[in-house]
Amino acid sequence: MEANGREAVEEPLPPGAPPPARAPGIAGLSAPGRVTASAALAAVALTACAHLAAVFLHVAPANTLSKRHAGAVDAWIYPEFEQNWKLFAPNPLQQNIAVEARAQVRTRDGGLVTEAWRDLSAEDGAAIRHSLLPSHTRQNELRRAWDFFTASHDEEDRPVGERGGLSEQYLKRIALNRLRAARPGDGGEIVRIQLRSATRAVAAPVWSDEETDTRTYHRELSWWTV
Amino acid sequence: MVDGVRRARAAAGRALARATGEALGPYQSAVVRIGFATTWLCFLLREFPHRHELYGPDGPWSWELAQKLVGSNHAFTVLLWSDSALWFEAVYALSVAASALLALGWRTRAVSVVFAAGVLSLQNRSVFMGDGGDNVIHLMAMYLVLTRCAQVWSLDARRARRHGSASAGAAGPVLWGALGAVFAFGTVTGRLGHGWVAAFAALWVVCAVWWMVDRYEPRSEARAVLDVLANTVHNAGMLVIAAEVCLIYATAGWYKVQGSRWQDGTALYYPLGLDYFSPWPELSSLLAGSGTLVMLLTYGTVAVQVAFPFTVFQRRVKNVLLAVMVLEHAGIAVLLGLPFFSMAMIAADAVFLPTAFLLWLGARAAGARSGLARRLGRSRPDGPAGAGLPPQRAPGGTAGPGPGPPPSDARAAG
């Protein structure tokens, strides 16, 4: 009541226009209005509940209901309502996966030179360090491109499905951009590039008695022609 | 028995009156709008130097690659309408403008559609550039279109106060015409999917009907019906936003419970040792050095995330957990270098903030504004409350939006 009183002082209605004395909501409407509003209310309520049910089945672990209705749920969720909240779950990532690249270059005198490995992830890390607002180009681009690659390739680095091919081209373009950006003008022409990952586990905390193997393991891809 | 039935009927009637008679949570919806629009605006400005690499036609995720992927998943993006750099720049600039205007609450319904289209266009164009923060913004941008999120703290609310209706002025029809032209182009050239054509057509027609009724028959039955429909959709939208936040925390928490590192109390130690998530290695190793602290934070995180969805009906506990989560996200912003993810999560949390706190925040902001204006020596044409901040008008005051509809002329359009 007090709020309404304050309202009246702050917002005088224009003269000659008394507020209509309607009950709030559906109850204040005429019969056709009530029918329209009731139908809309039912449709909106059903849609909202169906949407939330679909989102729930999408984010929950695979279960009886989500398996039975997988087709309908996926049709509703993908592509715009896709979501994944397993950030650092069930376990956080416990290893640093660095992506390294090297180039084979045709020099001016026609010879082929294989250059040294460059740690592209370390360059990302250096750009992120002491930054309050790290860029997605540094934090997500290469990291997620590598995830995309490994998720769409089998153990022998063979592409799985159409996405495998896309991920190869993506990774290649990222690596090439970065290799080219740091090259001197007359450093020759890049003919082929090779990528590898260097995986090293985060050492167990000093206050724990666990032992962690912190050696670096490499996964080397084949050479890609540019 | 009869008495019980009568009471139940009365309660149902009151619930129906609330669900259709008012747009609940005016301050909460406004703060969610401002939060997400500001987060995306800051992100776009921060990435402005990198915009070509992220979303441009010649970025590493090239236009052709995006076209192949979108060809199979049918995600919405206007950036694939053309591979010209000019089109890309225009879409990026429009996204920036829509974010700023949504934060200010200018022609909010129309601008919220442009905002959502911008978010979806950029994110779906380069889906592998995003992270959890982008995901939240993606969802909330769509949900916000459903809400009447400019009832307070908006230019629309100010226009409604000054001119009696948020539909006043010529900008509405101009905007409607311009957006209609873009929509017609996308439809005629076959660039929009059927679902999107239907959704945009519905929005476009409803906006026109709303504007005409609001302008020419503001006291009519038709206006009242539209008001009820808008309230219904708004309240459903707010329910979906709140439930989405609960689902985020529930899944995040419940999956963690199953993890051995969350069980042995060391989980938080590991992200602190990841090169991609330790912008302040000195700070990270300081925190990682204390087993007790890591253990308490690890267990605390899981406890809060699992518990939150069950506390939303218990105001006091909910508010405590909310404060803890906002603090934790602020910590994540700095410690793990995820500022935009954290901002987005705080904006989502804000849907659960108590009205009393939001009113206090609004009063502080208004005070700071008028203080600043006094110092700059400007005259204030709009009274002490300030342009974007209307006087405190929440019915009910402390316990969330109370009974009784706010006056309809204070409402933002549609």
Image: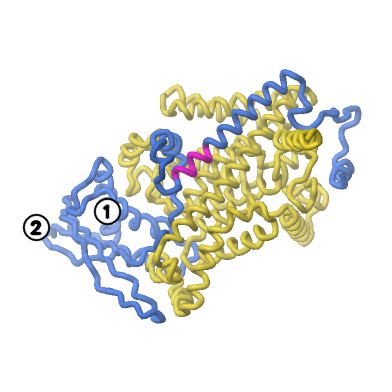
Task: Name the foreground residue: B45 vs B298.
Answer: B298
Is-magenta flag for residue B382?
no
Task: Name the foreground residue: B84 vs A47.
Answer: A47
Is-magenta flag for residue A54?
yes
Point out the tag, 2 or 1, that comes first from the N-terminus: 2
Instruction: Provide the secondary structure element on which disc 2 rests.
Output: loop
From the image, which quarter does the N terminus of chain B lie in?
top right
Q: CA distance from mark 2 to mark 1?
A: 35 Å
Tell me the tag on residue A110: 2
Above/below status of A166 relative to B226: below
Above/below status of A136 relative to B300: above
Other residues around mark 1 within 10 Å, as few (<14) / some (14–19) / many (≥20): some
Instruction: From the image, tell me which residue sits under label 1.
Output: A150
Q: Position of residue B252 (x, y in %)?
A: 48, 56
Q: In the rendered structure, which segment of residues is drawn in magenta?
A: A51-58
Image quadrant assignment for residue B122: top left
Q: Which chain is blue?
A: A
Q: Chain of mark 1?
A: A
Above/below status of B409 relative to B377: above
Tell me the tag on residue A4: none
Query: Which residue ends up furthest to the front in the rendered image?
Result: B1
Task: Name the foreground residue: B142 vs A73.
Answer: A73
| In-image side of B33 versus B306 (left or right) | right
Query: Which residue ends up furthest to the top in the rendered image?
Result: A32
Q: Does residue B80 appear in the picture of this structure?
A: no
Task: Name the foreground residue: A63 vs B293.
Answer: A63
